[in-house]
Amino acid sequence: MEDVDLTLKCIVVGNGAVGKTSLITRFVKGEYTDEYKKTIGTDFLETEFYSESADEEVTLHLWDTAGQEVFSTITRSYYRGSALCILAFSTVDRASFDAIKKWMSRVEEECGPIPMVIMQNKIDLLTDSSEVSLVDGDALAKELDLPIVRTCVKDERGVKELFDTLVSTYFDLK
Ligand code: GDP
Ligand code: MG
């Protein structure tokens, strides 16, 4: 069968300063170069991605919340048509970890049960006394029945794995 170019809208949600914008810009600019596309009130970046696990090539539209990290300020159009979601928190910000459940509920309200992955970012700052441990992350993933991927957007660690996990989940569920 001829390969059909599948475009998937992927939203990245989570509290402010956890690394969402960094993730999107790093991922897109590290792999390919694409221009920033402006839409009404929101921006997204486009990139091609080959998922090894799924053996599928997709076009991803990565939607940033552009600083609107308060639930109520994110418009319906931001969520509309999303196929994938990254729930992001920071290893050094307990409140961002505690907010993941709320973000997940919000996304489910707006998008239904789409594939989601938890992103534990700033793993470079993990210590014995950091605000969120690996055990905390595992417990949350288990509770929410979602995969979790540890990332350091700073040096790109885990970033490909994050998208690979998400895209392969999409194809598994299809
Ligand atoms: P956003 O508000 O979720 O979009 O967060 P940003 O992408 O703006 O990142 C917030 C801050 O965290 C910036 O200063 C980033 O440079 C920094 N940051 C992002 N990812 C990492 C990471 O993996 N490790 C470290 N140490 N800092 C990071
Ligand atoms: Mg941002």
Image (spheres, rainbow, N blue to C red):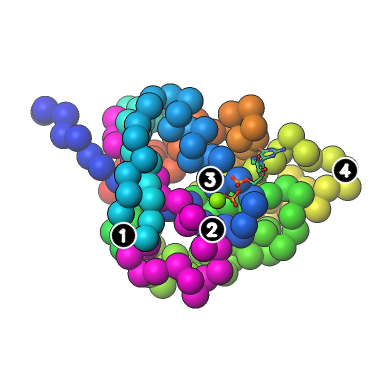
**Is the residue indicated by label 4 positioned so its CB lies within 8 Å of ligand 1?**
no
Say which of marks 3 and 4 sits in front: 3
Mark 3 belongs to which amino acid? Thr
- Residue 101: x and y, percent? 59, 66
Residue with the most extreme right position: 129
Q: Which residues are magenta?
A: 57-79
Badge 2: residue crowd in 10 Å (few <14, some 14–19, many ≥20): few
Write down the residue under mark 3. 21
Q: Is residue 148 left or right of residue 57?
A: right
Could you tell me how far apart the alpha carbons at marks 3 and 2 are, in whole angstroms?
9 Å
Mark 1 belongs to which amino acid? Ile
Write down the residue under mark 4. 128
Q: Earlier in the sequence, mark 1 or mark 4?
A: 1
- Quadrant for the N terminus, please: top left
Give the structural element (helix, strand or loop) at label 1: loop
User: Dividing the picture into quarters, in which one does residue 142 lie?
Assistant: bottom right
Write down the residue under mark 1. 40
Q: Residue at x 37, y 60 (%)?
A: 41
Could you tell me how far apart the alpha carbons at marks 1 and 2 are, in whole angstroms?
15 Å
Q: Is residue 134 above or below residue 31?
A: below
Q: Is residue 165 above or below residue 110?
A: above
